[in-house]
Amino acid sequence: MQDRIAVLERDVATIKSELEVIRRECADAADLTARTSRMELDIAILKGDVAQLQKDVTQLQKDVAQLKIDVAELKIDVAILKEDVALLKIAVATLQSDLTKLKEEFGLFRSEMTRMNTELSHCAKKEDLKELKAEMKAMESNLKGWMLVIAIALLSAQLAMFSYMRSIGPAIHASADQLDSTLSASRVAK
């Protein structure tokens, strides 16, 4: 019987050690289950973050496409402005050239009138001189009028160019500000 008790004691010790192993495995399983739950929660959060990132990337792609369109439109506007400025510069140069020529002609006319006046004063009567002087003054007045018209046209062209540049300036600045804010928003989103 003693053998039987020894065998039973060994069996009890073996069962106790197996029970201890089972307890450890249960604790490990509970720990593994808790870790798995945390990982599943983290994966769900990551899936949400990935979905939001995809939405953000899609929005950024739309913003970049719109920015490309805006830049293309601005380039067209700038090209048109350059053409307009070039045409205005040509018009102003032409008017300045015409004004210079008119001043030269006026100078020649004045010297010719002075020469004629001197010649006529030697050989004409006083009444003829008065009429001739009146005619000369009328011609000089007409010539001054034409010079004034050309000068006003020149000033008007310059004023038109200045007004045009001022009128489109805010639109260009607004487009540039919108472009800057969109680019800043894109950088912040990244």
Image (tube, rainbow, N blue to C red):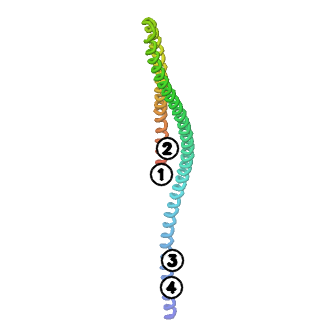
Residue 189 location (% of width, % of height): 48, 51
User: Which residue is labeled 2 in the image?
Assistant: 179
Residue 88 location (% of width, % of height): 52, 32
Could you tell me which secondary element the residue under label 1 belongs to? helix
Give me the residue at 55% from left, 41% from top: 75
Could you tell me which secondary element the residue under label 4 belongs to? helix
Could you tell me which secondary element the residue under label 3 belongs to? helix
Mark nearer the viewer, 3 or 1: 1
Amino acid type at circle 3 is Ile
How crowded pointer 2 is (Cα within 10 Å; few <14, some 14-19, many 20+) is rated as some
Q: Earlier in the sequence, mark 3 or mark 1?
A: 3
From this viewpoint, is residue 81 visible? yes
Q: Earlier in the sequence, mark 3 or mark 4?
A: 4
Amino acid type at circle 1 is Arg
Residue 188 location (% of width, % of height): 46, 51
How crowded pointer 1 is (Cα within 10 Å; few <14, some 14-19, many 20+) is rated as few
User: Which residue is labeled 1 in the image?
Assistant: 187
User: Which residue is labeled 4 in the image?
Assistant: 14
Give me the residue at 44% from left, 5% from top: 127
Q: Which mark is residue 22?
A: 3
Q: Earlier in the sequence, mark 2 or mark 3?
A: 3
In the picture shown, does residue 78 fall above or below 8? above
How crowded pointer 3 is (Cα within 10 Å; few <14, some 14-19, many 20+) is rated as few
Write down the quadrant of residue 77 in the picture.
top right
Give whichever of 168, 124 is nearer the camera: 124
Give me the residue at 50% from left, 75% from top: 25
